[in-house]
Image: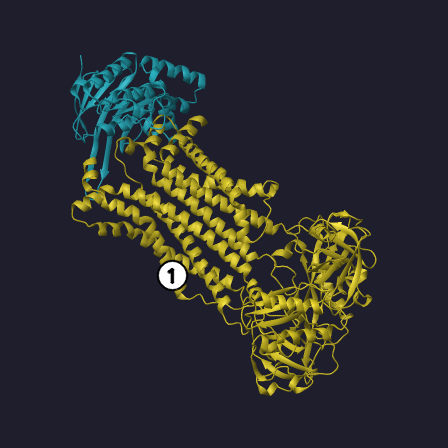
Chain colours: A yellow, B cyan
Amino acid sequence: MLRNYLLAAIRHLLKNKLFTAINVLGLAIGMAVSLLILNYVNFEFSYDNMHHLAKRIYRVESRFFEGNTLTDDWPTSSFGYAPAMMQHISGIQDAVRVDIHETEQIVSYENIRFRESDVAVTEPSFFRIFDFPLLEGDPKTALEGPNKVVITQTAAHRYFGETDPIGKILKFSTTGSVKNCEVTGVIADLPPNSHFHFDFFISWKTLPDWMNNFWYLHEVYTYVLLQPNVSPASIENAFPKMAEQYKTAAALKNKTWAIHLNPLRNIHLTPQKQYERETKGNRNAVNALMLVALAILVIAWFNYINLTTARALDRAREVSVRKVSGASKIHIIIQFLMESLLVNGVALVLAIGVMLVSVGGFNQLTGKNIPFQLWKDSTFWIPIVLVFLSGIFISGFYPASVLASIKPISILRGKSKQSKGTGSMRKGLVVVQFVASFVLIFSTIVVYNQLDYMMNQPTGVNINRVMAIKFPAQTDELQQKIISFRRELKGFTDVKNAAISSAVPGMEVAFFASNHRADDPNKQNRLYEMLSADDNFASTYGMKIIAGRGFSEDFGDDRNKLVVNEEALKLLDLPDNEESIGRRISVEGEEEPFEIIGIMKNYHQQSLVKAYTPIMMIKYDRIPWISPRFISVKMTGNPSAKTMANIRNLWERFFPQSTFDYFFVDQFYQQQYKSDQRFGSVFGFFSALAVFIACLGLWALAMYSGVTRRKEIGVRKVNGASVGSIMSMLNADILKWVISAFIIGVPLSWYLMHKWLENFAWKTALSWWIFASAALFTLVIAIAAVSWQSYKAANRNPVEVLKDE
Amino acid sequence: MISLKKIYKYYDNKYERTYILKNVNLEVAEGDFVSVMGPSGAGKSTLLNIIGLLDDPNEGEYFFLDQPAHQLNEKKKVDFHRHHVGFIFQAFHLIEEMTVYENIETPLFYKGMKKKERQSVIADLLDRFNMVAKKDLFPQQLSGGQQQLVGIARAIAGKPKLLLADEPTGNLHHDQGKMIMDLLKKLNEEGMTIIQVTHNQEFANYGKRIIRLTDGEIEEEILNN
């Protein structure tokens, strides 16, 4: 019997090539897209699952509270947390610290020299907790003792080529120090779905001793391995009390020091915080993509339902004949489910093909190099089978039961009328498709509008034609050389200005200090971002001083002076005008209070995703731990090759031991929007696909309705109806559907996009014109999809159809 | 075999009731051949549909082989179609996507017949109707008379006791119609009970009895021979 059903189905599908093609195409695109997205989502959820202890590993993240208010939330902890926790809090089996306070270093071996940005310092327990296999060396001893380093395969290749790296000495230089380390191990490159990627792991003992138990430098990631069945909450709860005996210094004394244990496998999809080394995944984006995938699938399924039920009439005779030949309802349902299975099966095969071809393009779109793991992962097969089966059932069952309930009597007599029920069901499904299309179109406009807003809003700083050169490594008389280098740079004709600073716009300022107003009786400490800069910094970047003055040599010594932004004044409870000039601020670790000499207008140090932060500017050579890292060079025009060569030559004359590394600040600044732009293009592309599939279905429905109503159209034309009036009659339904979809879609899309915009500190409004243009756009493409068919139906010669009967 | 008692079929409009069948009483014995005649709208097809359990009467009783057929549930009706009755239609109603062979095979499937058995039944029928060479053709490739032959073959493949024919010759030329009627007559002689609806007096005369319907009522009944 199966063979009979299959044969009938195949012949039927082949006979109606257009409908079959629309169904198969829609379903195949839908499946391919959802499989791609599924693979992507699967990858995003697979982060850090390569460690067999992953379920018990947590990252210790710092949280500071004033009363019950969370004031600071960092992914890092200080050097001292781990030993103290191991000593005082039970339930922790093991812990490892990964120091990130100097990840950028100049690394050299003989004449090979690179500026490396992934240098970490870690403990021997690293290899006990994480499963990164050592290709060479002994995991137990590789990181024991000082001046050892374990490197990745890629790094090994970079410095040693084909020769054995074990036992070779690498030189690591920063602005402050030079260390020689012996290579004791080589590990495979860290997998793409690890939340950190380092190339060098220097042994912990290489750090100065004072750091090991230091509580006032939150620049390590601490990972703890809990004993089996220990709840992370018990560790979190025990921490603040224990911390009291360690937080003895003045800084942040008035705050409660707490921790949050973030499960290792959750790290990638929890919100990005300050001090995160890498751009994390965005759970909202993952959810949005899953929604789009679902929408595309649903739209394709609904097309199948609509096209199948609309054409029920064509199949009615066959069903009737089968019924009088003794077929039961179940027989008919099984037959049409088989047909659905066939269509879905062909679509699936096609979808897998499409997916294999487009996975590269998809990776380009998402900017990730996601290995295609479909075949390996058993957990991935389940959703495929689920999608397939639910597709067959959802798209097949309703049409099958509609067809199975056809009464043979009316059909066999040659009279035929469409049952009213399926018509309204069809309208309902079309409206749902329109709602989905409207929401997707609306969301795409909002996403692009927000991107456009963020990228075109004045940032408050002028970053055009500024080149930022990274600081050289430690050398004799670095300070003097830097000053001379800056002076000579300014002498170049193309160079307008040159400045030294610890950060440039587009990055976190990242040095935090816990400060308070000197005259505050409560000594209320809060955290401020400390930006060290020279006299030229504000003018190089065109920052506005709204009261007082910036740093300047004209006033002699600016040693204990501060230039603060408006946001910092707010936090200090000071007015943002002349009255605040001369107020004294007590700065963490400094005996003498500092004096405010200028107020800087707020500017966007980082992208508009983030709010303004409180910034205090100090002189670049004032506090050693807030060291300068960049020399910003403002050009008069686009830098010529000659100028670039001159700057490079100058650099090599002053700093022959350092690599010359630079970037352009405007490009760097725009990089911050890359992930949002990518999300925009992925979302926009898939939304367009979803709308396309919906239109395909609509187009076919319109064609069908043109056929079934041709007699009515003919009669109307004979009685004097114009082509225009017939077309508007045929298109009137579409207008009704779009209006219904608009009424349902507006609150839905408002809610969704309101939620999405909450991710941004600076955001556009969901203004009426976005709703209006999304509705108009939906209407236009819907009308476009049906108009060709309406036009054809309206222009048919009435004689042809009326003679038929 | 068939016993219809006071069968009424009507539609209610707002103010009046329109009768399709009015107080129809009919007895058909096994081996009978009944022709139903009458003008358009007289209720001929409705009567046939009620007998074939495709339609229900509003009032009255219908006994098939002494079973109260008007009380059968959906499942029993399927059984009825599977084992007791075959249909022939004016428009043939063959399944276009299936070959001659497969069309004839359809009712055998639903009877749950094994493949070997089906093959022998169909081979016999094709042989008898001289259609062996055409078994792999599709309905569109056949003439009207040949299509109706396939329709008859399909209707009798399951060896039903009763054959219901709704204007079996209505779409055929006279010669083809005559061939079909000769075949029906032969089937009747072999023991098949047949009820046919027809407009054609010549073809009605093939029946042993002719029932004339007017406005839903049996006007007269003529016995042939």
As drawn, A644 above or below A320: below
As drawn, A105 above or below B146: below
Specify the quadrant that holds the C terminus of chain B.
top left
Q: Residues within 10 Å of mark 1 (few under 14, many from 20)?
A: some
Residue B18, visible in the rendered structure: yes
Which residue is denoted by mark 1 in the rendering? A773
Specify the quadrant that holds the N terminus of chain B.
top left
Closer to the camera in the image, A440 or B175? A440
Q: In the rendered view, does B34 fall on the left or right side of A10?
A: left
As drawn, A257 above or below B205: below
Residue at 41 percent of width and 23 percent of height:
B109
In the picture as drawn, the residue positioned furthest to the right comes out as A145
Residue A248 position within the rendered picture, expressed as x and y whole percent measured from the top left: 77, 73
In the picture as drawn, the residue positioned furthest to the front comes out as A642
Q: Answer with the quarter of the image where residue A261 lies.
A: bottom right
Regarding mark 1 in the picture, which secondary structure is present there?
A: helix
Closer to the camera in the image, A335 or B147? B147
Closer to the camera in the image, A386 or A660? A660
User: What residue type is disc 1 on?
Assistant: Ser
Residue A43 position within the rendered picture, expressed as x and y whole percent measured from the top left: 60, 49
Q: Chain for mark 1?
A: A
Q: Answer with the quarter of the image where residue A548 lies.
A: bottom right
Residue A88, visible in the rendered structure: no
Residue A41 position within the rendered picture, expressed as x and y whole percent measured from the top left: 57, 50
Residue A294 position within the rendered picture, expressed as x and y whole percent measured from the top left: 48, 49
Residue at 26 percent of width and 52 percent of height:
A728
Q: In the rendered view, does A729 fall on the left or right side of A514?
A: left
Image label count: 1
